Amino acid sequence: MSSSRTSNDLAAIKTEIATFLNLKDDQGRIVSNSKYGVYAFFDYDGEPIYVGQTSEKLRVRIRRHLTNQRTDAVAMNVLDPAEVAEVEMWPLFDVKDAREAATWLNRTEYTVFQHVLANSVLKAVLNEKDIAETELIDLPPSTRGRIIPNGVYERLKHPDIRIARRANTIANLARVISEREVSKGLRRTLITQAQRLEKLARIRFNDFAGDIPDEIAGEDTGD
């Protein structure tokens, strides 16, 4: 079973991304056209994998991440675009003053980060940079949707494909860490990636063999 997405897959996914980025809110505004906003990416299990903010339009920033255009997160192997199945956007249409934008972006990003962490099984997100703590706010209405077409989604959701992809991401991230001076946050991301791989591999093992043996689980079985 191939772990790579075909050219047909990529074309279909790009179309789905375009459809998502043209979704409108209840006031008829295209959500991704908001100049300021916060976004979150989710994997095929609905687990949050990345939270970010933008002041260059949600549409521009999200597309750059998902279409392999250069972003720090993708270049450093923090974010694998192929792991992203759903996207959620929190537009800040009411923010007009650039001087106030940073404050509202930081507050919104921190609140979103805490929100997705609370709903995460692993209680972890892949962001390599710490999100500055601010006061929590009432979030604006969000728009969430899947960016993978139905037929492609079912195939790419297969756990063996995702295990191979995550293992490759970990190898690439570990190589980056070994070759340069990196932040503590990037090493934390490596741990989170390993936890995500272990969780998926454990679930897949249970599909075939039942409970994980104690010696594999790392439990102390005693003498």
Image (cartoon, grey):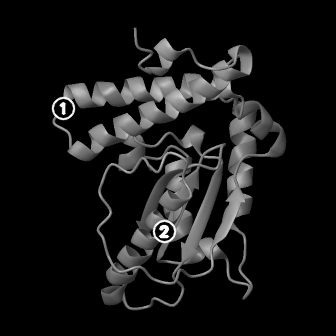
The answer to whether residue 76 of the structure is visible from this angle is no
- Could you tell me residue 30's position as x and y percent? 67, 77
Residue at left offset 36%, top offset 74%: 106
**Residue 138, above or below 151:** below
Distance in Å between CA atoms under marks 2 and 1: 31 Å
- The C terminus - image quarter: top left
Which residue is tagged 1?
Answer: 180
Residue at left offset 47%, top offset 51%: 123
* Amino acid on which the number 1 mark rests in the picture: Arg
**Numbered disc 2: secondary structure:** helix
Residue toward you, 35 or 161 = 161
- Could you tell me residue 5's position as x and y percent? 66, 30
**Numbered disc 1: secondary structure:** loop
User: Quick one: label 2, few (<14), some, or many (20+) residues within 10 Å?
Assistant: many
The answer to whether residue 86 of the structure is visible from this angle is yes
Residue at left offset 49%, top offset 21%: 217
Using the rendered view, name the quadrant where residue 201 is placed: top right
Q: Which mark is residue 124?
A: none
Q: Which mark is residue 112?
A: 2
Q: Nearer the viewer, mark 2 or mark 1?
A: 2
Using the rendered view, name the quadrant where residue 78 is placed: top left
- The N terminus - image quarter: top right
- Could you tell me residue 17's position as x and y percent? 68, 55
Residue at left offset 74%, top offset 60%: 19
Residue toward you, 205 or 59 = 205
**Residue 198, above or below 109:** above
Disc with the residue nearer the chain's start (2 vs 1): 2
Using the rendered view, name the quadrant where residue 53 is placed: bottom left
* Amino acid on which the number 2 mark rests in the picture: Val
- Could you tell me residue 172's position as x and y percent? 38, 26
**Residue 94, above or below 211:** below
User: Quick one: label 1, few (<14), some, or many (20+) residues within 10 Å?
Assistant: few
